[in-house]
Amino acid sequence: MKNETIRLAVKDFQIQVKWIKSYVITLLVFLAMFLLMSPKQYQMAFSMAALVTLYRFINLTMYEDEKNNTLRLIDSLPVGRETVVKARYLSTGILTAALIIVLGAVSFIADRTDRLASAAATICVFLIYVILMAVYMPIGFKLGYIKAVNVNRFVFIGIFLLIGIGSMLMGNLAGQRGYDAAGSLTSMFADTSPALVTAVFAVAAILLYIVSMKVSVVFYKKRELF
Amino acid sequence: MDAVLNVDRLVKKYEKFSLKEVSFQIPRGYIMGFIGRNGAGKTTVIKCIMDLIPFDAGSIEVFGLDSRRDSDEIRRRVGYVSEEQYFYENMTAGWNLDFFGGFYPNWNRDLGLSLMKKFDIDPSKNVGELSKGMKVKLALALALAHKPEFLILDEPTSGLDPVIRNELLELLLEVVQDENCSIFFSSHITSDIEKIADFVIFIEDGRIVISDEKDAILDKWRLFKVENSCGAAGLSERLIGVKKGEFGFSGMTDDPESFIRELTGNYPDVRYKVEKVSLDDLLVRIVREEEENEE
């Protein structure tokens, strides 16, 4: 990996140091809010709080670049646009990995009864994070922060609606034909080696992330910054 | 001629504006002033040179390298200061210098810090707290601290007070003398260019109208003020940027001898004055001429 990529990725964290207090407060507020809504669903609460943190991180990096117009200065340095995109995916990837490790550890330590389910849940959360980022970041690189934020509101609402409608349809199917989708998934996890499930999901997530990065590179190379 | 920059028939088309086959060269070790009013095409030419925007036709070579194919190599050896200064405003000046400077292989941190000291920039101050002049100086420190062979400055003195402008111009002269660095300096403030440039290019409406050594331009061009009493107004067509008044007309030419011959040959009793011109006079008259031609 090039030094320039690492330098740019580190910059994404450095420029957010001033937001640390705000990050911690937001994380705690969301954690408390979700725990109050469903006290036993601590995994869900932590997942949602982590997702908010990640979404905020991407938004703030894009916001700082756009507000200060620094992408223009970076564009005039001996740094290719591809490197700029790769660096953003690297910094976001590092934060995602850190959050997933913490989430996995929390789930693993807290839920001693069903660690398989905990691992599967963590992986699902990981996949959801990656899907959301894989959708959001190319839009961000194509349109810039201000437009991307507005477009993504609708995209994310669409994704959650699709998930909701899909769940409802599966529920209806289960009711009509006696097909229990959730049960089938659970038994599939139970029958398959957790290591294999983890590996398959992880590879799928990484592939999706790479495809998203390639799309972002194409978009960003074509974007007119001046 | 050993040219550090060679722009050849550059064409860039926008909906309402275009660069029309712009061609010029900058010899190594000299300062080239790039003059034109706002919107004449100066920044567009510079962005094409830096490969920040694509162009439609022509070619640009910097150090003999193709501006599009070898843009990274060119950027490593060029110091560029844009019209506006873009830094992370919530980070300190020192952090910004280190961060952006670190992308240059020849980056000299000590030189960067000593330049900041010379410019009275407090490295611990957030960029957001710096004045426009200070930001320009920070951008210059960034552009100079990797020892560029060629400096490209896009209106760096615009919006600065005369004292800071003067300091900046003196610094540029030092850079050329000490580092043997070539400078391409765009501005609509002609007095700045007149102070430091060796060569001058005038651009108007996307077209190069004059390109020559500064001294040659100032030697050649003359302002004629001709009284109308003898009916010589017909000769005003031989001049550019003509102003007509009740008592006569004035205009400029780069061939004063031939104009005097024609004027005195046709109108022996004519009364006229010949004056030297400044780059500012030239810019104003050229713009006037272009506007009249458009009408």
Image (cartoon, coloured by chain):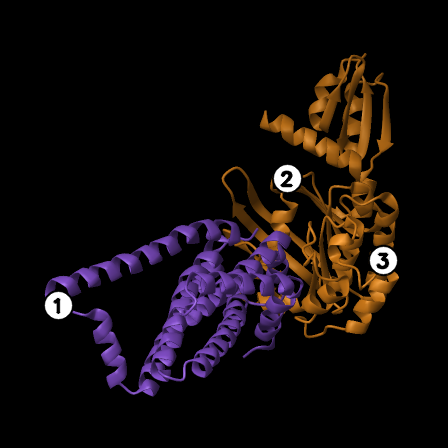
Q: Give the residue type that dot 3 points to.
A: Leu
Instruction: Reply above or below: A125 against A193.
Output: above
> Looking at the image, can residue A164 be seen?
yes
Q: Quadrant of residue A214?
A: bottom left
Q: Secondary structure at mark 1?
A: loop
Q: Secondary structure at mark 3?
A: helix
The residue lying toward the viewer, choosing from A214 and B276, is A214
The residue lying toward the viewer, choosing from A70 and B228, is A70
Alpha carbons under labels 2 and 1: distance apart:
72 Å
Mark linked to residue A178: 1
Query: Residue at position x 24%, y 71% from top?
Result: A182
The chain coloured orange in the image: B
Residue A125 location, x and y as percent? 39, 71
Q: Give the residue type that dot 1 points to.
A: Gly
Mark linked to residue B39: 2
Alpha carbons under labels 2 and 3: distance apart:
27 Å
**Badge 3: chain ID:** B
**Badge 2: chain ID:** B
Q: Earlier in the sequence, mark 2 or mark 3?
A: 2
Mark linked to residue B171: 3
The chain coloured purple in the image: A
Q: Are marks 2 and 3 on the same chain?
A: yes
The residue lying toward the viewer, choosing from B177 and B273, is B177
Mark 2 closeness class: few <14, some 14–19, many ≥20 residues within 10 Å: few
Contact check, label 2 and label 3, Cβ < 8 Å: no
> Looking at the image, can residue B23 be seen?
no
**Badge 1: chain ID:** A
